[in-house]
Amino acid sequence: MTDMARRPGAPLTIDCGTCPVQHVGCADCMVTALGSQSALPDPGLATQLPLDRREREVVSRLITAGLVSAETANEARAVHEPRSGYDELRRFAG
């Protein structure tokens, strides 16, 4: 069982603005179907942090699937966002 499976309901934000393959892999990305970039918070306004365990696991899965190279994934950073950003995303996603 993965760490993600042990924590159901824990929020996970995928921000197109900090995606390591931004503008390269958008055409077939499933995340773009969830919302437009305008609904996501501006990553330049938030503090960048190292990825946590669950985020690293997700990036590892993207590497394994061939969607992201290891070199590109090393540039991925987490962004601390205010809680209100999650409420807006949840409302937008329906």
Image (tube, rainbow, N blue to C red):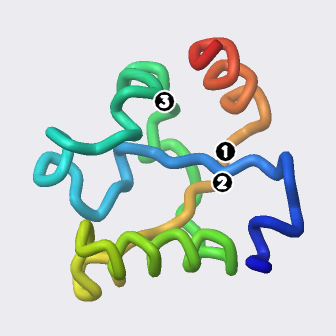
Measured in 3D between alpha carbons, the distance from the residue under mark 2 to the one under mark 3, in whole angstroms, is: 13 Å
- Residue 55, quarter of the rendered image: bottom right
Q: From the top left corner, tell me how far across and down residue 27 is, in percent.
A: 15, 39
Per the image, the residue denoted by label 2 is 80
Asked if 21 appears above or below 66 in the picture, the reply is above
Contact check, label 1 and label 2, Cβ < 8 Å: yes
Element type at mark 2: loop
Q: Is residue 14 left or right of residue 31?
A: right
- Figure disc tally: 3
Between 23 and 62, which is closer to the camera in this rendering? 62
Asked if 74 appears above or below 94 in the picture, the reply is below
Comparing labels 2 and 3, the label whose residue is closer to the camera: 3
Disc 3 marks a residue whose amino acid type is: Leu
Task: Give the label on residue 40, or none.
Answer: 3
Residue at screen point 58% across, 14% down: 92
Circle 1 Cα neighbour tier, 10 Å, few/some/many (<14 / 14–19 / ≥20): some
Comparing labels 1 and 3, the label whose residue is closer to the camera: 3
Circle 3 Cα neighbour tier, 10 Å, few/some/many (<14 / 14–19 / ≥20): some
Q: Residue placed farthest to the front in the image?
A: 1
Element type at mark 1: loop
Q: From the top left corner, tell me how far across and down residue 84 is, in percent.
A: 75, 26
Per the image, the residue denoted by label 1 is 81
Measured in 3D between alpha carbons, the distance from the residue under mark 1 to the one under mark 3, in whole angstroms, is: 10 Å
Circle 2 Cα neighbour tier, 10 Å, few/some/many (<14 / 14–19 / ≥20): few
Q: Is residue 79 left or right of residue 37?
A: right
